[in-house]
Image (tube, helix red, strand yellow):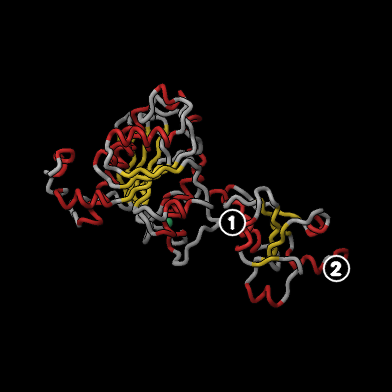
């Protein structure tokens, strides 16, 4: 028995087999901040074999009040690089994979796919909804956490049957929009909540892979803590019948927070034909509809998006300009500069001035 893990291996819930299971586990922590710092430290200390860290930020002096992976000399350095150094010192047995980039719809599936479980250590709703979608598509559990002022929340979502984060918050709660910079946070609160997330990750690994029935994860439940009044409460998150987690077919859809906050921008056919050079034109109807008739320059399918440069305008159309609104937001969520063409093909043919095809 290795001395490093002796104190947990003597626990019957862990033992030699549990330690082996932990060593084989791959956990991705998104955000190396107030939540990610303590979470990563406990996961590394416990001997989780592979840890991924996603963060594109550099250490700021104002982070040090709560982001305990970092020291004063680290100010200005990349967070993932410092985190990797610190965690390697703590436990050289852990494989550390760093992603010095911001998670968005175009890289999220790639990054998350090689891990068993995802930890949400982010402080913004956009990424939280994105992680929820990704966890559902990849069917990987998500350990959610959030902090504000003296309050904290943790939940575990299974990424499969639901409930999911969107069942809990179908829309970004306006009252909670704002991050630590805007709302303030008491440093030790992030310590408790980030540690709680680590605890739930470790319990999940041992529960799911080692059949440790006594280590019930916070699955489908929300733990809410008010550290001022010491009010702690746990309740079950109800499944929403119309939620994304109820759908069998899942893809990175426009069903992100942006879609609820943002109206898809529209352009007219006059805008399109008056542009020089003309924007890319995407027919987003079915393949059958496209093959039956389409504008000569219109593309179909998403393959061509690979080569689209940043800032390139993409106009999307359908028959009436309704389906294209959805597709437009979908593309925008993925980082493309897309516009929906108002009225669609019907609108074009009805417009006498533009009856050119
Ligand atoms: Zn749901």
Closer to us: 151 or 231: 151
Q: Is residue 146 above or below residue 131?
A: above
Residue 291 occupies quadrant: bottom right
Where is residue 246? Give x, y as percent. Answer: 43, 63
- Mark 1 touching mark 2, by CB under 8 A? no
At x 24% / y 49%, what residue is drawn?
Answer: 22
Closer to us: 299 or 157: 299
Farthest front residue in view: 92
Q: Is mark 1 within 8 Å of ligand 1?
A: no
User: Could you tell me which secondary element the residue under label 2 belongs to?
Assistant: loop
Residue assigned mark 1: 330
User: Could you tell me which secondary element the residue under label 1 belongs to?
Assistant: helix
Residue 326 occupies quadrant: bottom right
30 to the left or right of 39? right
Where is residue 221? Give x, y as percent. Answer: 32, 50
346 to the left or right of 22? right
Q: Is residue 341 above or below residue 224?
A: below
Residue assigned mark 2: 355
Q: Is residue 269 visible?
A: yes
Farthest top residue in view: 72
- For marks 1 and 2 on the same chain, the one whose residue lies earlier in the sequence: 1
At x 53% / y 58%, what residue is drawn?
Answer: 253
- Which quadrant is home to the C terminus? bottom right
Other residues around mark 2 within 10 Å, as few (<14) / some (14–19) / many (≥20): few
Residue at mark 1 to residue at mark 2: CA–CA distance: 29 Å
Q: Is residue 144 visible?
A: no
């Amino acid at each position: 028995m290795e001395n490093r893990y002796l104190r947990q291996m003597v626990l019957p819930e862990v033992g030699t087999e549990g330690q082996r299971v932990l060593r084989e586990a791959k956990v991705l922590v998104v955000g190396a901040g107030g939540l990610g710092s303590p979470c990563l430290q406990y996961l590394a200390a416990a001997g989780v074999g592979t840890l991924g860290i996603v963060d594109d930020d550099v250490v700021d002096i104002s982070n040090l009040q709560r982001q305990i992976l970092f020291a004063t000399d680290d100010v200005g350095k990349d967070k993932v690089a410092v985190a990797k150094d610190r965690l390697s010192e703590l436990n050289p047995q852990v494989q550390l994979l760093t992603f010095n980039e911001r998670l968005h719809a175009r890289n999220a599936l790639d990054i998350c796919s090689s891990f068993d479980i995802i930890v949400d250590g982010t402080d913004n709703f956009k990424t939280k909804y994105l992680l929820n979608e990704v966890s559902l598509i990849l069917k990987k559990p998500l350990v959610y956490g959030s902090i504000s002022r003296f309050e904290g929340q943790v939940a575990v979502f299974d990424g499969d049957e639901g409930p999911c984060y969107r069942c809990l918050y179908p829309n970004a709660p306006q009252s909670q929009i704002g991050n630590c910079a805007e709302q303030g946070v008491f440093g030790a609160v992030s310590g408790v909540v980030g540690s709680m997330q680590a605890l739930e990750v470790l319990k999940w690994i041992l529960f799911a892979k080692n059949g440790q029935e006594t280590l019930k994860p916070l699955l489908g439940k929300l733990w809410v803590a008010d550290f001022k009044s010491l009010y702690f409460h746990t309740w079950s998150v109800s499944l929403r019948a119309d939620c994304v987690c109820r759908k069998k077919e899942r893809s990175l859809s426009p069903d992100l927070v942006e879609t609820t906050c943002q109206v898809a921008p529209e352009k007219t056919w006059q805008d399109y034909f008056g542009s020089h050079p003309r924007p890319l034109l995407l027919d987003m109807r079915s393949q059958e509809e496209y093959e039956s008739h389409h504008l000569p320059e219109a593309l179909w399918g998403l393959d061509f998006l690979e080569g689209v440069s940043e800032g390139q305008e993409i106009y999307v159309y359908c028959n009436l300009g309704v389906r294209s609104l959805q597709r437009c937001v979908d593309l925008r969520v993925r980082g493309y500069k897309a516009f929906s063409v108002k009225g669609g093909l019907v609108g074009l043919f009805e417009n006498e001035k533009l009856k050119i095809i």
